[in-house]
């Protein structure tokens, strides 16, 4: 059952999203959900190479500039980020604003900022599901992992640079 735990990233979430553990997180997926033009939830999978915490109130994304996901955020300015891993499930809801239409390090991507509005933690209800917990998050395989970790450092650095003026 998910519970509202605040309007800023928790210590654990902030640590996970600072981009300091890229080797450890290289094959983990972050789920980004938007709402499409018909009102349907639209999920997209990002990696820890495309999402970073600027501070406890702002997340930055690099998403393909012409994707449905990016267009949904441009249109309605809302998104939910799901961080799911062993014994952890967080949902971060917020308002999204485009920071740059094209990124220097990845010209095919747009730089977006999500201002955190609500943070939820989800866990099994001990009364009904005693001992149950999330055993893992979604992962993917990346045959070019080593070179992509090096490139991710450049992308994340560009994402956290600058402010929302």
Image (cartoon, rainbow, N blue to C red):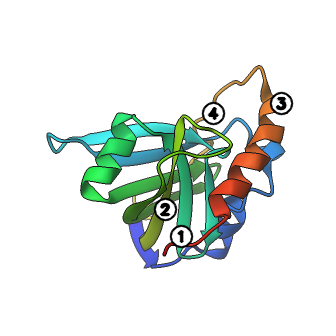
Q: CA distance from mark 2 to mark 1?
A: 6 Å
Q: Residue under label 4, please give it.
A: 139
Which residue is the site of mark 3?
Answer: 147
Measured in 3D between alpha carbons, the distance from the residue under mark 1 to the one under mark 3, in whole angstroms, is: 27 Å
Residue drawn at x 40%, y 62% is 97
Q: Position of residue 70 (x, y in %)?
A: 39, 44
The mark that comes first in sequence, 2 or 4, is 2
Precedes in sequence: disc 1 or disc 3: 1
Q: Which residue is mark 2?
A: 113
Quadrant location of residue 17?
bottom right
Q: Where 155 falls versus 94 (above or below)? A: above
First in sequence, mark 1 or 4: give its number: 1
Counting from the top left corner in percent of width and height, residue 155 is at 69, 47
Q: Residue 69, image x and y in percent?
A: 37, 41
Q: Disc 3 versus disc 2: distance between alpha carbons?
A: 26 Å
In the shown orientation, is residue 80 left or right of residue 149? Answer: left
Q: Which residue is mark 1?
A: 58
Mark 2 and mark 1 residues within 8 Å of each other at the beta carbon: yes
């Amino acid at each position: 059952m998910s519970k509202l735990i605040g309007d800023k990233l928790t210590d654990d979430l902030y640590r996970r999203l600072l981009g300091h553990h890229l080797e450890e997180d290289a094959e983990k997926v972050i789920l980004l959900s938007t709402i499409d033009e018909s009102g349907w939830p639209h999920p997209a999978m990002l990696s820890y190479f495309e999402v970073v915490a600027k501070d406890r109130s702002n997340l930055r994304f690099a998403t393909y500039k012409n994707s449905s996901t990016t267009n949904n955020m441009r249109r309605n300015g809302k998104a939910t980020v799901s961080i799911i891993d062993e014994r952890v499930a967080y949902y971060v809801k917020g308002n999204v604003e485009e920071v740059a239409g094209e990124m220097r390090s990845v010209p095919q991507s747009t730089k977006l900022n999500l201002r955190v509005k609500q943070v939820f933690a989800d866990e099994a209800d001990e009364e009904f599901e005693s001992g149950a917990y999330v055993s893992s998050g979604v992962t993917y395989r990346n045959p070019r992992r080593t070179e992509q970790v090096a490139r991710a450092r450049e992308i994340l650095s560009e994402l956290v640079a600058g402010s929302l003026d």
